[in-house]
Image (cartoon, grey):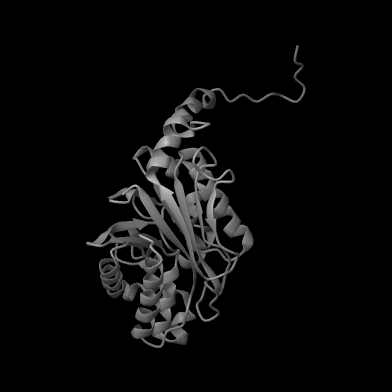
Amino acid sequence: MNLVKIAAAAYPLDWFDDWKGYEAKLGSWVGEAAGNGANLLVFPEYGAMELASLGGAAVAGDIQDALHEASRHKERSETLHARLAAQHGVHILAASGPVFGLPHADGRPVNRASLFGPDGLIGHQDKAMMTRWERDGWNVVPGDGLQVFDTPLGRIGILICYDSEFPLLGRALAEAGVEILLVPSATEALAGFTRVRVGAMARALENQLIAVHAPVVGTAPWCYGMEENTGSASVYGPPDHGFPPDGIIAEGALGQPGWVYGEVSRDAIAAVRADGGVLNLRHWPEQEPQLAKVALIPRDREIS
């Protein structure tokens, strides 16, 4: 498929008294985006933490209990996402959340995002780089490697929030042919949101690809660790031929819940990689000789 209409979610967390409430919310969100012609829907990081509400206030207010409760609903959530993807004929990156039981994780959770297509679950991506609060407070552990999803919409990669701030991760995905990079995020403060935003835009620039930024927004005072959430949804491209000069294909208002839509062309990605004003993807290896020659110039050195 050459043209891809992307829907990036600025997603608020809600309290649910029962599963039907969550099912209705997700069905409404997916139905809206699909009804507006989107064929790739991107939900945010830790959006699955709203499922902790199903355990009640005491569970949702304790981080370890909340993580386990959200994880407990993973299989049921996957079934729902698969059904909605099939019903609407779309691809969906589900909101990420904790998953326990991986062999390398020693009883701790990973932060997992799952990708679905019209034919069902395509696969998972676990967050690679843990933030300080994930390391020190939540004790979430990294996943084991990066996945490249070869889909009818193009090759898709996922860098979850903090992952987007590390260039070598994005580079590895680009070298594996990724054209569309999904960046779900959850950030409390404007500074955190800005770091992910800048990271996503930089990955789009240096790898000449599309980056889709989908954050959690609003307040959830009942959920430990997700009380305040700042962000806006956006779709970025390289600021070069065939793309907006500021690299912003679509962008929502800060803190405004809802979908942001951007239509992108895989042909435009191929064209800018082949004959852009700059050729960042192709020229990346030329850095290596310079990196081997880093020299410190002493303060008192005289230059003749």
* Residue 99 image position (x, y, % from top left): 34, 66
Q: Residue at x 56, y 73 (%)?
A: 218
Q: Residue at x 51, y 42 (%)?
A: 238
Above/below status of 112 relative to 204: below
Residue 191 left/right relative to 178: right
* Residue 178 image position (x, y, % from top left): 37, 44
Above/below status of 217 relative to 69: above
Quadrant of the image for the C terminus? top right
The residue furthest left is 119
Residue 202: tell me if it is visible: yes
Residue 302 left/right relative to 199: right
Name the one closer to the observer, 124 or 1: 1
Name the one closer to the observer, 68 or 247: 247
* Residue 22 image position (x, y, % from top left): 38, 80
Q: Residue at x 55, y 63 (%)?
A: 187
Q: Residue at x 60, y 65 (%)?
A: 254
* Residue 130 image position (x, y, % from top left): 47, 56
